[in-house]
Image: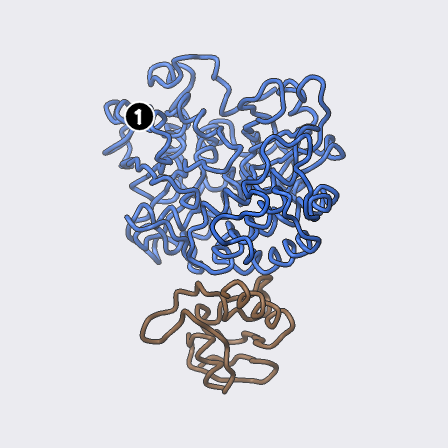
Chain colours: A blue, B brown
């Protein structure tokens, strides 16, 4: 079975330049520098490479929105997004640490293809070790003339700079990431204009998830058609999954687009012994949960979309019969409340309000109107906010209530105790709320 | 000049005028909190959301600039629902 990013992961020294080169590393860069940027873009278009950071936006289409160099000369940039913060996702930290040169090579190819002379990797602040490994790899590459002036004897010069994030989830959003890079608080911008027209410091900027960039050397070496054929009609290549939850062998798994959910869970050792599958979150906690009825779904960006969810960043969380879905919903909304940047009213207010309602439901203080009220608030948040974090608040609420209505109904009654399966009840105590808030909620 | 349609009626406004100002020009009030001509248009209160033909989501009138051919509604059922909803979240 073809693996792309994780192909050489059984080589423990893959992060060392000499080992990476021995295994074919930087052949992609060499070949790319002998092609024209237009030819590289054509291969990426043929490849059906979709953005792997969550949105699944076709990479070639993103490059196509850049203004032509003759109309808008001047600096342009490529930024690798390694702000991996979606709960359930941990694959970027693994491939950046195991194969940092693969990312560097992909970033250089992208810079060459779009006319950038500076590439960046924005790494979430918490990934200290990954940053050190990547920094060491950048130094190795600079010493070998793979980064810097006249790379590999060609006219192409390019620098790479690493930047560390300040610890927010929202800085994983492209415009918020750019704000953070500019030294400001990571408040998302309101496109239009989009980053490819007005990005870092106002210059055209392509922001790509680091896994997306890591695919580029392989697309250049083997051709776009090869990459496309590995996947499905509109999602080329492979998907890098983080599988966690109630499975025997959680970990990072790479599978071609179109692999079924069943095959993915089986590869991860299957559901915990003695338990039955209850739900699967496919793309990180922002995505609506799928159920056992979806086990034979061939996973790609469009098939999952058709089922009302998103492949996202492939953060697959498997939940078995011991999972309490109201708690799960509360945990996710809690996260979003904490991470809301606070800029716009519906997200800032709607997230904390619905979190409080969920805490009441889990504390025996539920009211009959709670589930319907949660859905009503959800409708006032989704589609009305500056960025997708706000949309997610409503999407998650409605998805969990729609799929597990009985669990919510059961708690929407005063005195309802947390279910026997739940391990962590709500944090409000009966008769008391956090300092005077109970009556308002 | 941009020729737009506002609530079913044609309106001519200088190109790139903010929709909220174009509406005001026509005597149509769009509720808003965070916009003031002297202080800027951050577009984060979300009270001024209006319906623009061709956009699946409601758009903040204080951020969008009038462009020839735009069809805007400030009083459709979706807009009225949004106003009530956003006000509730403010309060």
A191 relative to A135 in the view: left or right = right
Asked if one can make out residue A56 in the rendered structure from this viewpoint, the answer is no
Nearer the observer, A429 or A139: A429
Where residue A400 sits in the image (x, y, percent)?
A: 66, 44
- Answer few, some or many: residues within 10 Å of disc 1's Cα (few below 14, many 20 plus, some between 14 and 19): few
Where residue B1 sits in the image (x, y, percent)?
A: 44, 81
A302 relative to A99 in the view: left or right = right
**Circle 1: element type:** helix
Tell me the quadrant of the picture where the C terminus of chain A can be found.
Answer: bottom right
Q: Is residue A134 above or below residue A192?
A: above
Where residue A110 sits in the image (x, y, percent)?
A: 40, 38
Nearer the observer, A57 or B82: B82
Read off the residue under disc 1: A132
Tell me the quadrant of the picture where the N terminus of chain A can be found.
Answer: top right
Where residue B78 sits in the image (x, y, percent)?
A: 63, 69
Q: How many marks?
A: 1
């Amino acid at each position: 079975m073809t693996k792309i990013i994780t192909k050489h992961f059984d080589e423990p020294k893959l992060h060392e330049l000499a080992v990476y080169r021995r295994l074919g590393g930087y052949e992609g860069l060499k070949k790319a520098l002998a092609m024209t940027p237009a030819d590289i873009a054509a291969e990426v278009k043929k490849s059906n490479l979709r953005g792997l950071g969550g949105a699944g936006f076709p990479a070639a289409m993103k490059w196509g929105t850049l203004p032509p160099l003759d109309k808008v000369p001047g600096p342009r940039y490529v930024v690798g997004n390694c702000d991996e913060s979606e709960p359930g996702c941990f694959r970027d930290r693994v491939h950046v640490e195991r194969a940092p040169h693969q990312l560097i090579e992909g970033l250089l190819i992208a810079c060459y293809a779009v006319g950038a002379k500076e590439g960046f990797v924005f790494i979430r602040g918490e990934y200290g070790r990954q940053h050190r490994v990547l920094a060491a790899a950048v130094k190795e590459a600079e010493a070998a003339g793979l980064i810097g002036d006249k790379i590999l004897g060609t006219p192409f010069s390019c620098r790479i700079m690493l930047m560390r994030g300040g610890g927010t989830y929202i800085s994983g959003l492209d415009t918020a990431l750019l704000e953070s890079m500019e030294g400001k608080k990571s408040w998302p911008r309101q496109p239009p204009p989009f980053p490819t027209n007005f990005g870092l410091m106002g210059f055209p900027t392509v922001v790509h998830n680091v896994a997306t960039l890591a695919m580029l050397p392989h697309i250049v070496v083997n051709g776009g058609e090869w990459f496309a054929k590995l996947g499905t009609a509109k999602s080329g290549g492979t998907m890098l999954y983080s599988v966690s939850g109630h499975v025997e062998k959680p970990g990072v798994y790479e599978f071609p687009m179109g692999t079924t959910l069943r095959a993915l869970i089986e590869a991860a050792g299957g559901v915990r012994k003695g338990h039955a599958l209850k739900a699967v979150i496919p793309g990180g906690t922002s995505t609506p949960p799928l159920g056992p009825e979806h086990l034979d779904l061939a996973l790609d960006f469009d098939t999952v979309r058709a089922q009302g969810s998103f492949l996202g960043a492939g953060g697959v969380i498997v939940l078995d019969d011991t999972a309490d879905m109201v708690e799960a919903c509360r945990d996710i909304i809690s996260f979003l409340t904490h991470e809301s940047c606070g800029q716009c009213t519906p997200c800032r207010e709607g997230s904390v309000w619905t979190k409080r309602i969920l805490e009441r439901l889990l504390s025996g203080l539920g009211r009959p109107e709670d589930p319907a009220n949660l859905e009503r608030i959800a409708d006032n948040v989704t589609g009305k906010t500056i960025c997708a974090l706000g949309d997610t608040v409503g999407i998650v609420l409605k998805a969990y209530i729609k799929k597990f209505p009985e669990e919510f109904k059961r708690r929407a009654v005063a005195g309802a105790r947390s279910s026997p399966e739940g391990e962590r009840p709500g944090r409000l105590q009966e008769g008391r709320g956090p300092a005077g808030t109970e009556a308002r909620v | 000049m941009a020729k737009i349609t506002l609530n079913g009626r044609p309106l001519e406004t200088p190109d790139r005028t903010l929709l909220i100002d174009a509406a005001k020009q026509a005597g149509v009030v769009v509720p808003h909190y965070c916009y003031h001509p002297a202080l800027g248009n951050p577009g984060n209160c979300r009270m001024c959301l209006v319906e623009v033909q061709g956009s699946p989501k409601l758009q903040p009138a204080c951020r969008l600039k009038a462009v020839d051919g735009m069809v805007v509604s400030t009083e459709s059922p979706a807009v009225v629902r949004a106003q009530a909803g956003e006000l509730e979240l403010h309060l």
